[in-house]
Image (spheres, grey):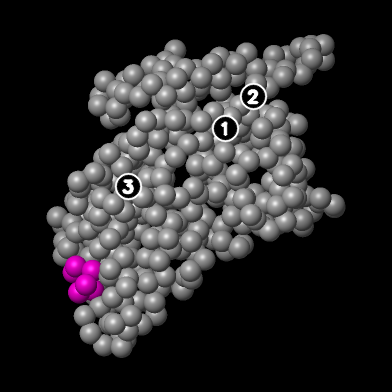
Amino acid sequence: MATITDGYKRRLAEQEIEPDAAQAALAIRLDDLETELAAYRPKNGMLAKVFSKPPVPPKGLYIWGSVGRGKTMLMDLFFEETSFEPKRRAHFHEFMADVHDRIGEARKTVDGDPIPHVAEGIAKEARLLCFDEMHVTDIADAMILGRLFEALFAAGTVVVATSNARPSELYKNGLNRQLFLPFISALEKRLDVVELGAKKDFRLDKLSGATLYFHPIDTAAKAALDAHWKRLTGNHPGKPQTLDVKGRKLQVPVASMGVARFQFADLCDRPLGANDYIHIAHAFHTVIIDGIPLLTPDRRDVARRFINLVDALYDGRICLIASAAAEPSALYPKGDGADLFQRTASRLTEMRSEAYLAGHSGGRTRH
């Protein structure tokens, strides 16, 4: 049977990744977890259920470290290679959106607290949960996570998660954070906390010296964005994702390995606000946008949304890769609002620079 280390070595041989001692050590630790999961499988048969003690689940893993160190790559490799079933892999935002939907449905039929009922249903569907990008910004999530995960752990669920922050920094400075602290305690009790201290940002290394902004909007620009997607995701096809923004669903057309790709219309022709863009900046380290058009006064609302989007990505130190109708300074050539847009044009230009990318790799810790 193939191991996680075998898969890691295979990717090295195929030159999809570069050698790194910290990544190799984590692959071995994930192999150990796979061995523990194999021993955790409950015995079959009625007599075994009657006379055997319930199996003790192994401790999961909480893998944290700076952006681009290979956390998602290794967790996905583990998820692909493990034979443990049933299992589920989800972006943490996507998982929490599903949880809120289930709570809403449960309230229609369940008296009292619906969370134990929801946790029981999730645990039946997946005894191994793999979460990418665990971070908490929404108070609605923060207030239920402790009870939800205590119930999941009590049901024998094993969790593997990646994050840019250590557990003690999750929901830092959040409203009513004292009510969130039991969740941190549960994580530290049920998961081994491992820092992936890879020496460099491998994603940044892939982008170093590369062109990130392409114009005009043509087949060559699309091909360039496709190539960046393949390079950053390891040629993973990606899939749609849903972000929960204060109870609303924000659809991401395709995402993988911390990279999201949108058409300009997905982001700016729809009635989205600054909070939507901030959630995108928290959920992904890189955003690819196809088809930024010329902006005119008669599309003032679209231009305003684009300004808010760029501000959110810039403030979050997010890597932006885009195709556009013109250079940033020529995107809003004249008319009411053109002067105000020059600040955004300046930011778009800066976001293509090596200095911005270097700050992007370590300038911000996302919670």
Q: Which mark is residue 358?
A: 3
Viewer-closest of 358 and 248: 358
- Mark 2 sits on what residue? 59
Q: CA distance from mark 3 to mark 2?
A: 35 Å
Q: Earlier in the sequence, mark 1 or mark 3?
A: 1
User: Disc 1 versus disc 3: distance between alpha carbons?
Assistant: 26 Å
- Tell me if residue 171 can be seen: yes
Q: Badge 1: few (under 14), some or many (20 or more) residues near its Cα, within 10 Å?
A: many
Residue 224 highlighted magenta (yes or no): no
Residue 292, horizontal then vertical, whole percent: 27, 67
Amino acid type at circle 1 is: Tyr
Quadrant in the rendering for residue 327: bottom left
Please tell me whether mark 3 sits on a helix, a strand or a loop.
Answer: helix
Q: Earlier in the sequence, mark 3 or mark 2?
A: 2
Nearest to viewer (mark 1 / mark 3): 3
Relative to 231, is 105 on the left or the right? Answer: right
Instruction: Look at 30% across and 58% down and name the residue there.
Output: 351
Q: Position of residue 187 (x, y in %)?
A: 66, 35
For the point 34% across and 52% down, which residue is it? 319
Q: Secondary structure at mark 1?
A: strand
- Classify mark 2: helix, strand or loop: loop
Range shown magenta: 326-331
Q: Are marks 3 and 2 in contact (CB under 8 Å)?
A: no
Q: Is residue 362 left or right of residue 337?
A: right
